[in-house]
Image (tube, rainbow, N blue to C red):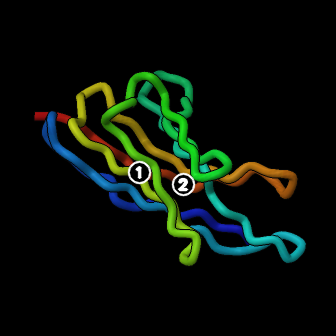
């Protein structure tokens, strides 16, 4: 059974930082399922892609977080991370990690990030 579990959310003041983690476990047909993307869903808004890992260690970010957020991975532990700096109130959302491939589309349950003074 594939599981993605996010952690690291919380309440932070504007300008602060948080580091989110996503731990993946399980496999499909002997293939390890690895997360590669972070999404977020703010109240009243659709879920949006925030950051993703591409081939050859390249990364891609939503314009709204470029220069502030950094996605990274630990392949040995099958984890990805999202370092979020200079947080703004508009970053408030539930953050989800995701793995989508030929073997399925998997989501964690999310971790809540609240940016407020």
Residue drawn at (74%, 49%) of the image: 100
Residue labelled with disc 1: 82
- Measured in 3D between alpha carbons, the distance from the residue under mark 2 to the one under mark 1, in whole angstroms, is 16 Å
Position of residue 1 measured from the top left corner of the image (x, y, whole percent): 75, 73
Q: Residue furthest front?
A: 56
- In the depicted view, which residue is nearer to us: 81 or 40? 81
Q: Answer left or right for 32 relative to 89.
A: right
In the image, residue 53 sits, relative to residue 35, either above or below, namely: above
Label 1 environment density (alpha carbons within 10 Å; few <14, some 14–19, many ≥20): many
Name the residue rendered at 45%, 49% in the picture: 71
- Residue 74's label in the rendered image is none
> Could you tell which of marks 2 and 1 lies nearer the N-terminus?
1
Q: Position of residue 88 (x, y in %)?
A: 24, 30
Image quarter hosting the C terminus: top left
Q: Is residue 37 left or right of residue 62?
A: right
Dot 2 corresponds to which residue? 109
* Mark 2 burial class by Cα count in 10 Å: few <14, some 14-19, many 20+: some
At 54% across and 76% down in the image, what residue appears?
77
Q: Answer yes or no: do the residues labelled 2 and 1 have beta carbons within 8 Å?
A: no
């Amino acid at each position: 059974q594939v599981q993605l579990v996010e952690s690291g959310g919380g309440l932070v003041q504007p300008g602060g930082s948080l580091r989110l983690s996503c731990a993946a476990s399980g496999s499909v047909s002997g293939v390890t399922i690895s997360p590669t993307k972070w999404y977020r869903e703010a109240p009243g808004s659709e879920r949006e892609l925030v950051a993703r890992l591409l081939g050859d260690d390249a990364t891609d970010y939503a314009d709204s977080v470029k220069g502030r957020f950094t996605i990274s991975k630990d392949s040995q532990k099958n984890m990805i991370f999202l370092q979020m700096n200079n947080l703004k109130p508009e970053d408030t959302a539930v953050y989800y990690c995701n793995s989508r491939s030929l073997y399925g589309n998997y989501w964690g349950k999310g971790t809540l990030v609240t940016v407020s003074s």
